[in-house]
Image (tube, rainbow, N blue to C red):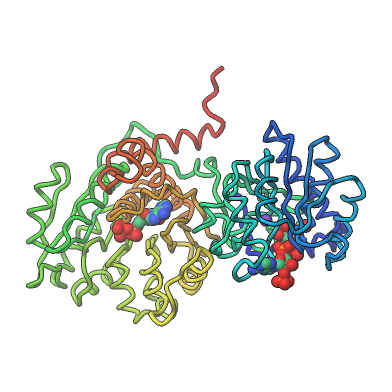
Amino acid sequence: MQPVLNINDVRCVEVALTREGVSVSELMHRAGYAAAQEVLELGDVDNVVVLTGLGNNGGDGWVAAEALHGRGVNVKVVCPIEPDGLSGDLARQVAQSAVRAGVSTLVGPPRDELESLLETADVVLDCMLGTGFHGEVRAPFDIWIECVNACGARVVSVDVPSGLSGQTGHAASACVVADMTVTMLSLKPGLLADDGRDVCGAIVVAPLAEQTERLVVDADPVAWRTDLSDYLEVTAPRSAAVDKFSRGSVLVVGGSRRFPGAAIMAARAAARMGAGYVTLAMPASAAGVAQAHLLEIPVVALPEDADGVITSDARDVVLKLAERSSAVLVGPGMRVSGGTCALVSALLGSSTPLVIDADGLNCLARLTNGELPEFPEVTRRTAPLILTPHRGELGRLVGATTPVPDSLVSQLEAARKVVWSDGGSELVVVTKSNATACVGVERAVLPKPGPAALATAGSGDVLSGMMAAALAMHRDEDPDLALLAAYVCEVHGYAGSLAAERVGSHAVMAGDLINVIGLAADAVDEHAAFPEGPDEG
Ligand SMILES: NC(=O)C1=CN([C@@H]2O[C@H](COP(=O)(O)OP(=O)(O)OC[C@H]3O[C@@H](n4cnc5c(N)ncnc54)[C@H](OP(=O)(O)O)[C@@H]3O)[C@@H](O)[C@H]2O)[C@@H](O)CC1
Ligand SMILES: Nc1ncnc2c1ncn2[C@@H]1O[C@H](COP(=O)(O)OP(=O)(O)O)[C@@H](O)[C@H]1O
Ligand SMILES: [K+]
């Protein structure tokens, strides 16, 4: 796994490195060389334009320019002011050094001159704004960024694409769209989420010093990005000595007369993920519809109210079914009522591994008055519990008065409030978004996100069914829950890619995901076992 550090903690690592004898000047030189090296490795690089800003990100650019010039590349540095006028000592010194070495410069060019120069470039190195960027992009960088994005050259950004917040992942109205980002010391959350996913291109981490790995871990990473090989310990157990029950049985509780589909999809997804036996429990008036769709999955009719919503009278039958199951999912399509809240509460009190999704989470928010972190006793249990909120549900769980978490870091913060108040290793919050995090008390794990095709109604119901199946299949193994949840998200993401290949990237519906879950799981398992591909020899 690769550590992800908040920007402030990256700065702490920089300070720690200087305490261990690696000066900031040395770091800037190594950063510049690392960027130059990545540019050279792209191949066919004769002409490079380096766009520099006024801070240390610009300093990295001047070092890279001098290094590329030393390797015989035709380099031109574009800077907003004369190099001698840079106010930061370090940036000024490296700029002056590059000029002395013969690197040619272009100071404050008008737009058309910059456009003509960029037309000659094989690669543009973007060193305008790094982690010191804040607010909206000011002139001249707003114009420069427009020109970079319009030119045909390959674009390499140093540390972060200029205009992107490396912390939140929000892009300013002007933001470089890079083909590659060479980021210093460690991954940053904003590179992996929201606009960061669109503008970073391939991400390369330059550690800059041998002490970095240790110091980054000491700096308490906000999350860990998985590599496929990390999943080896949670891929599906493979033994022929099984029957349908020992493969894991799942009970899905949900649906309503108005919304029967969500629970049906979750049940099908659980079966496709590999649970040997799935049961669906639904309000009586929806059960007939469900059974007509589900030949392999028995549907149990539950008592309902006049609106076709499960009532609290269902409690005993649901608890009995739960006791016989390896894992339970509650919530999809269920609606929020006194009856469904009572059901969620009863299932929390049971000793069966549990996934709570959708309206199950809204019931939980109602049970805890939107203050889940203040009621750790509600979620504290001996069996695993996975909550799968999207941003809206997460906001409702941690307090209706706070705004909905709108970035990966704010989601992580909200989820941490929940898991830390609980304090146990049996609770994981999966914060679903374009960059989902699986947050446990020990660490937050970031699976590789799937494609935007997943942003379709019902895709979350599919995920929660898969999640319950994974819990059921691993119930005897005491798996690392956050890693298991991340594995499921990775398979879900891969299913999104497969489905997009089959039906087109804009056409994927949740049902398409269900059909390829098995193929996606096989592919992820294979990649986990053979990250470099199977040995042909
Ligand atoms: N961490 C490390 O270990 C290492 C870090 N290194 C490098 O240092 C970089 C951080 O450097 P940094 O702190 O000097 O900030 P940087 O990104 O150059 O920006 C500051 C300049 O931008 C300006 N500016 C800000 N907002 C703006 C706006 N909206 N529109 C326009 N301008 C704006 C701001 O102006 P001000 O707001 O102060 O007026 C100031 O002039 C980091 O990303 C990495 O590349 C490596 O060298 C070595 C190892
Ligand atoms: N832009 C995106 N890129 C990748 N995955 C996404 C994106 N948008 C949504 N997803 C994923 O799709 C699923 C949507 O779940 P959810 O919001 O609960 O949908 P629904 O309630 O319609 O089932 C989540 O797994 C989420 O991580
Ligand atoms: K940059």
Task: Give me the residue at 32% from left, 73% from top.
Answer: 364
- Check the image and name the residue furthest to the top: 537
Q: Nearer the viewer, residue 89 or 523?
A: 89
Q: Which of 507 and 444 is in front in this view?
A: 507
Residue 166 lies, in percent from the top left, at 61, 61
- Check the image and name the residue furthest to the right: 100
**Residue 30 vertical placement versus 336 (above, below):** above
Task: Give me the residue at 21% from left, 61% from top.
Answer: 254
Residue 89 lies, in percent from the top left, at 87, 65
- Left or right, 535 with respect to 280, comes to right
Q: Quadrant of residue 159?
A: bottom right
Q: Nearer the viewer, residue 507 or 430?
A: 507
**Is any atom of residue 414 visible in this view?**
yes
**Residue 501 vertical placement versus 456 (above, below):** above
- Left or right, 283 with respect to 144, comes to left
Quick one: quadrant of the C terminus?
top right
Q: How many labels does the image show?
A: 0
**Is any atom of residue 11 visible in this view?**
no
Q: In which quarter of the image is ligand 2?
A: bottom left
Q: Nearer the viewer, residue 60 or 266?
A: 60
Task: Give me the residue at 36% from left, 48% from top.
Answer: 453
Residue 5 lies, in percent from the top left, at 64, 60
